[in-house]
Structure formats: C-alpha cells, structure tokens
Amino acid sequence: MTEKQEKILNAALKLFAEEGFRSTSTSKVAKAAGVSEGLIFRHFTNKEGLLQAIIQMGEERAKELFSDIVLEPDAKELLRKYIELPLKVKNDKEALEFWKLQFKIKWELELYGEHKMIVIEEALIRAFDQLRYNEPEKEANLLLTLMDGLATRGILQETYELDEATKFIKQKYKV
Amino acid sequence: MTEKQEKILNAALKLFAEEGFRSTSTSKVAKAAGVSEGLIFRHFTNKEGLLQAIIQMGEERAKELFSDIVLEPDAKELLRKYIELPLKVKNDKEALEFWKLQFKIKWELELYGEHKMIVIEEALIRAFDQLRYNEPEKEANLLLTLMDGLATRGILQETYELDEATKFIKQKYKV
Amino acid sequence: MTEKQEKILNAALKLFAEEGFRSTSTSKVAKAAGVSEGLIFRHFTNKEGLLQAIIQMGEERAKELFSDIVLEPDAKELLRKYIELPLKVKNDKEALEFWKLQFKIKWELELYGEHKMIVIEEALIRAFDQLRYNEPEKEANLLLTLMDGLATRGILQETYELDEATKFIKQKYKV
Amino acid sequence: MTEKQEKILNAALKLFAEEGFRSTSTSKVAKAAGVSEGLIFRHFTNKEGLLQAIIQMGEERAKELFSDIVLEPDAKELLRKYIELPLKVKNDKEALEFWKLQFKIKWELELYGEHKMIVIEEALIRAFDQLRYNEPEKEANLLLTLMDGLATRGILQETYELDEATKFIKQKYKV
DNA sequence: CATGAATGAGCATTCATTCAT
DNA sequence: AATGAATGAATGCTCATTCAT
C-alpha cells in the first residue's frame, strides 16, 4: 500500500460518507487526494473497486470495534457496551465516517450487510439467555433493531440527543 | 394537474424509490412516463423541483396515514396502530414506494424530515402519559427510534420477519 | 434528417475515410461538423451507430453506381463500364471518400461486404457467358479480384497510374 | 536482442495483426508479452518505434520470401512461384500474420511500401520480356495489381477459394 | 535490464437544462 | 401544453509516456 494509495482511500472514504457514492466523482476524489485521476483506476480498477476497498477497510475496523463487545464475558457489561456503541462511534471522527458510509451504502445500493451483524446477534442472544430473559432471540433482534434506529437518528438528525437516549435505554435494560 | 403531469410524478416516484434520486436521470423519467424530457422542466422547473413535488405528495399521503393514529382517543389503541404502521405500509405497494423514497432521500440528501414526526411524537407522549409511564417524553422518543429501525430493516433486509418483530413489540407494550 | 444531422454525417465520412474509424474521435467529428458532441449521440446512439449510418449511406450510393453497370444489356459495354469504375470513382471526390472508407473499414474491422458484390458478380458471369468465355464464373471472379487490387492501388499508391492500368486491362478484355 | 525484447515483438506482431495498430494498447502488448509496460519504451522509444521494429522484421522475412522468386532463372517458374505466393503465405501461420499486418498498416496509416516491391517488379518485367510478351512492364504491373487483389481477398474474405483462383491464374499465364 | 508507480491528455458517453416551434 | 433538437459541462475510464528505484 503506497502513500498515494492511502491518500486516495482516505479522500474517498470522506467524500463517499459525506456526499454519497454516486454523487462523488472520481475526479473529485483525485483532486481531494492530490493525485492524478488515472491513478485511482490503476490501483482500484474502477470506481466500484475503490468502494469495495473502503468497505473492506471498514469491515476490519468494525471487527475491532465489535470484538471488544463479543468477547465480554459478563452479560450486563456486554449489553452496556453494545448500547453505548453509537455514542462511542459518534465521538470518534474517523469511526463516524465509516459508519455513515455503511449506512449510506445500505440505502444507496440497497444491500444490507447482514453477515457482519450475526456475531453480534449471537452474543446478544447468549447475554439475554444468561440474564434469564424469556425469549432471548427476540430480545436480541429487538435490541439490534432499536440500535439501527438509534444509529440512524444519531447520524442524520442533528438535534437528536444521543446520550440522553442511550442513558434511557441502558436504564430500561438495567445495565 | 394535467394527466401528463401525474404520469411524470408517478414515474419519478417509482424510479427515485427504486434507484435513488441522483442515479435516476430525467431522460429515464421522461421515457418511463411516456413524455418528452422538456415537459418535466416546463412543469417542475428542474430535477430538484420534481423531487420537491414528490416529497410534498408524500407528506400529504403521510398525513392521511398518520391522522388515523393521531386522532385515536384510546391510548393503547393508539400505540398499537403506530406499532403496526410499518407492517401496514409494507403490504401496500404504493405506500411502500413512498416510504422507501423518504428513507432513501433522508440518506442521500441527509435531510431528516423532523416536522412531519412532531405530531406523532406529541400523540405518543400523550398516550404514554395517559398510561402512567414515568417518563412519557423519553418513552415516546424511544418508540420513535425503535420504529425507525424497524422501518429500515423492513425495507432493506429481505430476510427480516417484520410481523414477528411487530408482534413482539406489541407484547412488550401490552397493546 | 435535420441540417445538423447531415453535417455530422458528412464530417464523419470525411474524417473516417481520411484517418480511420478508431483514430477519429467523436469530439473531432463534432468540431468538424460545428455541433456539440452530445448531438452525435442523440442522433446516432453511439460511435458505432454513426459508422453504420455512413455505411448505409454508402450502400445506397454504391447501388446507384452499380445499377448502371448491372443493367447494361451489351456484354462488352458492361465489362468496359465495370473496368472503368475505379477511374470514375477516383475523379469524383465524394465517391472516392465513400470508397476509401469502405476499404478502410474492410481492413480495420475485418469485415468483407460480400453481398454488395454478388449482383456485380452475377452480371459479370452473364457477360462472360455471352462472350463465349470457357469458364465464366472463374473469369468473373478473376476480374473482381483484379479490380480489388486496382482499387487498392488507385487509392493508396500515390504514384499509381490508374488510367494506364485501366487502358491495359480494357485492351486485354478487348472492350 | 534480449529474450524479453523478442517476446514484446512477437506479442505486438500478433496483436497489431489481429486488432490493428491503433486499437492495440501498449498495456495489452505488455500483458501479452509478460513484461512491464515501461520496458516497451525502454527498448523501442515509443509505440511508433515498436511498429517500425516489427515492420523491419517483416521486411527481412519478405526479402527471404521474395529472394527465392527473384533469383529464379527460369521465367515460367518465376511466374509460377510468384503466383503461388499468397497460397504459400496463407498456409504458414507466422507468415500470414506478417502479411496481414502489412496490409492493415497500409490502410491504417496509408503508407504503401513500394520499395519492397520494386525488386519483384523488375524480376517480373524480365520474365515477361523473356517470354516475349509485348508490353512486359504493363504485364508486370497488371500481375502485381492482381496479386494485391488476390492477397486482399485471401486474407479478408473467409469464403474465398484461394487455391481455385491461384490455379486459374496459373492457367491463364500458362505456368 | 527491468519494474511499477504516476501522470495528463484524451476518449466515448450521459446529464440536466434551454429553446424554437 | 408539448415536443424534440441542441448544448456544455461532467463522468468513468483508457492511453502513451515518464521516472525513480
């Protein structure tokens, strides 16, 4: 990975997250990265390839972010960490960009990256089971759905009070 | 509103919902509507104007959809109706298109249409208040967020079991 | 066929004949025709479509050119007319352009437009038959081949003395 | 001439002959030759230089091919050999590639390589003279032209029966 | 000798928009 | 109201070529 390759990747991530994949032209990316437009294609074949490279980069960062949650042995602590995730992401400029891009792509290209969430889902099920909830699968699913909504609002609705909402949810789950 | 005007609006709604605003060219809309491309601009000034016209059309349909909920006097019944909304929308092909478009636009243009939801929020607050919930505002906000997540998944995740989830949520709220 | 459409066609014919199909950019055609580049695509879909339109135009002109030969009742006169064809073409600036393009395309795209020649071949066979040649088919084929060579040289080899060669061939066939 | 140099030359010959000079990118040549694109420029300065190298290579092979004809002392035998040349070339895969390229370039770049043919022309003149033809120069020129046509068809027209045509021509010249 | 990163100009094509009819 | 010709700017991508290593 050369220096310019990274510059392209970073510029593209930022622009795709801000303005969307289709609305961001390769020439804009090149200009922002301070490289020639042709270089994008030499390294990533085409615009789609550039997106894939960014998504993969995101997957890896997501894995890191998730591993801390999934490996948590204490059920209550696990729930707490998961619920606090959006807040944590929002305060980390770089992570926020990745997350925003994930959501934007979800809607722009209508592809829901399920597999990434399965490991989280299973961890939540185990946690709810441990905490003696009656229907751990449904509880896990509900929480996942709620967090999707929380992330949506946290990203899009400028006035949304994410920490208030987070606190209230933790209270609900007694964590 | 002439016949051709309506044809344009319908074609645009469908295409914008399916493929996104920016990805849909005016020529595609014209072709789908069976009119000349110029006519779009005569009637709606520019592409943005066409989008605004569709959004406004959506607002009106949303109002209709919401009025039934907002005017419901019984608190439990109100919650039930609101929770069942995504399911209802998903089974109505035309309504689904509108809803999908709303979400797509939310993400593509990053504008969260808050004002439309305020009347719903107030109705929910009243309902939770009536049902003696301790923090009716926070409860209303939580439910709104949850429903955002539910709609997201219902639209995007093909495997999502919307009716199961709906049933579970109703159970949680005892409605 | 609007005025600009014709301008495009003429400019393209000239440029394709002079510099070849692939070497001529659509922007060059547009500039030479004095129109916007986009107009080419509105009228002819793509560069290939532009070429097809020109080729078809050429077919029609070729038909005119050939009809005079094919319909000639006198065998000797028919041969004479056919042999003199390259000379006639070379002296008609517009016809020469068409012919040059035909040959260039033959080589650039490796497609030999046989069907256009079949009616000529049949006319030649009849003529040789009438003139009591032993193997009229082979004679027709030979003359066709010779004329291919004559045209090739007449177009490409600047020093080629086309009228001398034509005279000698007529002498050979006693026409 | 290093091994890689030869690989480049062979790959380029094949591609130029198949797809034309302008349509073949240097990157395609490099890939086909299994070398880096830069190496082409180190060895041949630019794309044009690569073409010249191939053409020169062709000249040498043509000389070999022609020497057998030119040095033939018997006039009839000389004619026969020359007339059979296209057939011989067509059956030699490698020679055919060279020949095809020569013709393609002739049309693509509109340069008719006359000098290569002068020695053949002179040999033909001597032969026709020896055989007491009245106008040996014109006869030589006619045969050269005919063979141009024969080669054209032999290469381009898939259905062309080259051996039949060859046989008929030999018959005509009684060789 | 050989590579592969890097460039800038150019390519065919699409786009939103204007305008005369 | 409605059309279809016309435009100019932009788009994703390819090209021949250069250069540091």
Image (cartoon, coloured by chain):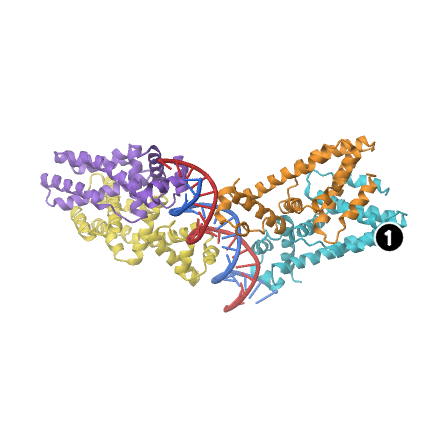
Chain colours: A orange, B cyan, C yellow, D purple, E red, F blue
**Chain under label 1?**
B
Q: Quadrant of the C terminus of chain D?
A: top left
User: What is the x, y in percent for residue A54?
Assistant: 59, 42
User: For residue B155, which quarter of the picture?
Assistant: top right
User: What is the x, y in percent for residue D144?
Assistant: 20, 43
User: For residue C28, which quarter of the picture?
Assistant: bottom left
User: Which kind of residue does numbered mark 1 sit on?
Assistant: Arg
Q: Quadrant of the N terminus of chain D?
A: top left
Direction from residue A96 to residue D112 in the image, left or right = left
User: What is the x, y in percent for residue A56?
Assistant: 60, 39
Q: Residues within 10 Å of mark 1 (few under 14, many from 20)?
A: some
User: For residue D76, which quarter of the picture?
Assistant: top left
Direction from residue C17 to residue C46 in the image, left or right = right
Depth check, front residue: D23 or D82? D23
Direction from residue D39 to residue B121 in the image, left or right = right
Identify the residue shown where x is 84% and y is 54%: B71
Identify the residue shown where x is 25% and y is 36%: D61
- Residue at the disc numbered 1: B126
Depth check, front residue: A110 or A79? A79
Depth check, front residue: C168 or B134? B134
Q: Secondary structure at mark 1?
A: helix
User: What is the x, y in percent for residue B11?
Assistant: 63, 54
Identify the residue shown where x is 20% and y is 50%: C166
